[in-house]
Image (spheres, rainbow, N blue to C red):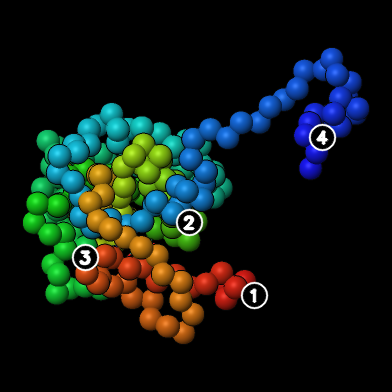
Amino acid sequence: MADNYLENRYDELFGSGRKKTVVKHVGQSLDTLLKKNRSYRGYDKNTKVNMEQLKKIVAVNPLLPSGRNQQALRFKLVTHDTGAEKVLANIKLGGALPELHLPFEGTEPEAFIIICGITPENKILDIDLGISAQSMLLKAVEMGLNGIMIGAFNKENIKQEFNLPYEPLLILAIGKGAENIRLVEINEEESHKYYRQDGVHFVPKVKLEQLIL
Ligand SMILES: Cc1cc2nc3c(=O)[nH]c(=O)nc-3n(C[C@H](O)[C@H](O)[C@H](O)COP(=O)(O)O)c2cc1C
């Protein structure tokens, strides 16, 4: 395209004196955030996550869609100083790699967001839960942090330990990821199980062409 083509065309259409709107791409693209948003099961202990950071992550929630706009999710924020060890004792990471007993010692996550539902769990609440969890993880990535969704946890213990008035549905661990994670494209009939090789964590993803019906 010739130099200044767009500018000249704009002037032709709207006149050269008009105010122009310049669209600038600031920050990371959604694709970049999504690619970086992997599930980390090992974290850098030197990077402490504080309450302010957790609040900033939870602050995406009033911006999200919600079935019937019911907004029935509530969030308990937990840091190193406010009970992280109680969460750690009640979660299971890396169920597909039981022999590794993840997380490795010294790489445990130390900040968590416990997502609770104020209504009984139903389809709409679960959809809201997914939207909320993924949005918060993307926010964490934007802030230079990482995380993971944890569905395998002892609900009763977590409810009791934190004196929660509502059902805990899902836990997010938040921290600075300290793992080398790579996506691998697969055919849908191949194993979907994540695996580790030479210190790299591989996550198989079904190729796009097979996702579209
Ligand atoms: C709803 C949900 C619950 C999950 N629960 C756990 C869990 O309890 N423990 C765990 O290690 N990973 C858990 N994960 C992480 C998945 O194992 C992970 O998303 C999957 O291996 C793909 O890796 P990726 O997130 O890096 O693409 C969960 C993910 C989702 C979406």
Q: Are marks 2 and 4 in contact (CB under 8 Å)?
A: no
Outermost residue on the left side: it is 105
Quarter of the image for the N terminus: give it.
top right
Outermost residue on the bottom side: it is 189
Tell me the CA gap for discs 3 and 1.
Answer: 36 Å
Instruction: Please name which of the two marks, 3 or 4, marks the residue nearer to the observer.
Output: 4
Residue 159 visible to an observer of this rendering: no
Tell me the CA gap for discs 4 and 1.
Answer: 39 Å
SS type, badge 4: helix
Left or right of residue 76: residue 189: right
The residue where tag 3 is placed is: 199
Q: What residue is shown at x 28% (from left), y 65% (from top)? A: 201
The residue where tag 4 is placed is: 5
Disc 1 residue type?
A: Leu
Tell me the CA gap for discs 1 and 2.
Answer: 22 Å
Q: Which percent across, then down, holds residue 173? A: 26, 49
Q: In what quadrant does ligand 1 lie?
A: bottom left
Instruction: Please tell me in which quadrant of the rendered image residue 13 appears.
Output: top right
